Image (cartoon, grey):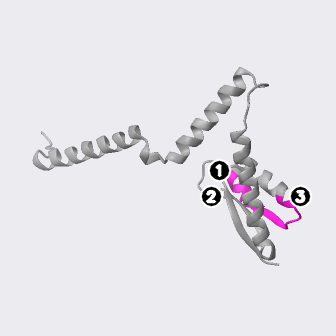
Amino acid sequence: MEFKIIKRFYSDIEANIYFLKFQEAGIQCFLSSENISTILPLSDGGVFLNVAENQFHESILLIKAIEEDQLNNIENEDFKDATKEDIYYNKKVIEHENWLNSGWIDNNFVSAFIFLLFIIVILGIIVNFFFPFQNIK
């Protein structure tokens, strides 16, 4: 039986949640690269969800249903039973997700830092060209 990668996860927890929901729905699947992402959590690899080719279309529909359910849960969140720590934690998670989705180059501080570093290197090259270091004996 042939399998195809259907989704990539950067969190092994989220990958396992999807994996269990797929198994519950009767879809043949497995996770790959799970060990690498555990050993190197900041690597760009991630965890891959693989599904049987003959259940690929059904899997896409299930992923859409899971993501729609997640969106509905976020929209319908209430904090009536939450503690102060729960609210701050949720706020930090949302801020972190927004920061990750914005892309590092969009961050003004990082862009300014890279630009200044570039200018310093260029100025160093120019100064070294016109005033080379001389050994004094």
Of residues 100 and 65, which is closer to you in this image?
Answer: 65
The quadrant the C terminus occupies is top left
In space, the residues marked 2 and 3 are separated at their CA atoms by 26 Å
Mark 1 vs mark 3: which is more N-terminal?
Answer: 3
Across and down, in percent, residue 120 comes to 25, 42
Residue type (three-letter) at the residue carrying disc 2: Gly
Q: Which mark is residue 24?
A: 3
Residue 122 or 22: which is nearer the viewer?
22
| Amino acid, disc 1 | Leu
Q: Quadrant of residue 22?
A: bottom right
Please tell me whether residue 35 belongs to the stretch shown in magenta.
yes
Q: SS for tag 1?
A: loop
SS of the residue at dot 2? loop
Q: Which residue is mark 1?
A: 40
The stretch of residues the image draws in magenta is: 22-37
Local crowd at mark 2 within 10 Å, few (<14), some, or many (≥20)?
some
Which residue bears the numbered disc 2?
A: 45
Q: CA distance from mark 1 to mark 3?
A: 29 Å
In the rendered image, residue 45 lying in the magenta stretch gets the answer no
Q: Residue at x 57, y 36 (%)?
A: 95
- Residue 46, placed above or below residue 104: below
Farthest top residue in view: 84
For image coordinates 11% across by 44% down, the residue present is 131
Residue 63: % across, % down: 74, 59
Residue 86 pos. (x, y %): 72, 27
Q: Nearer the viewer, mark 2 or mark 3?
A: 3
CB contact under 8 Å: marks 1 and 2: yes
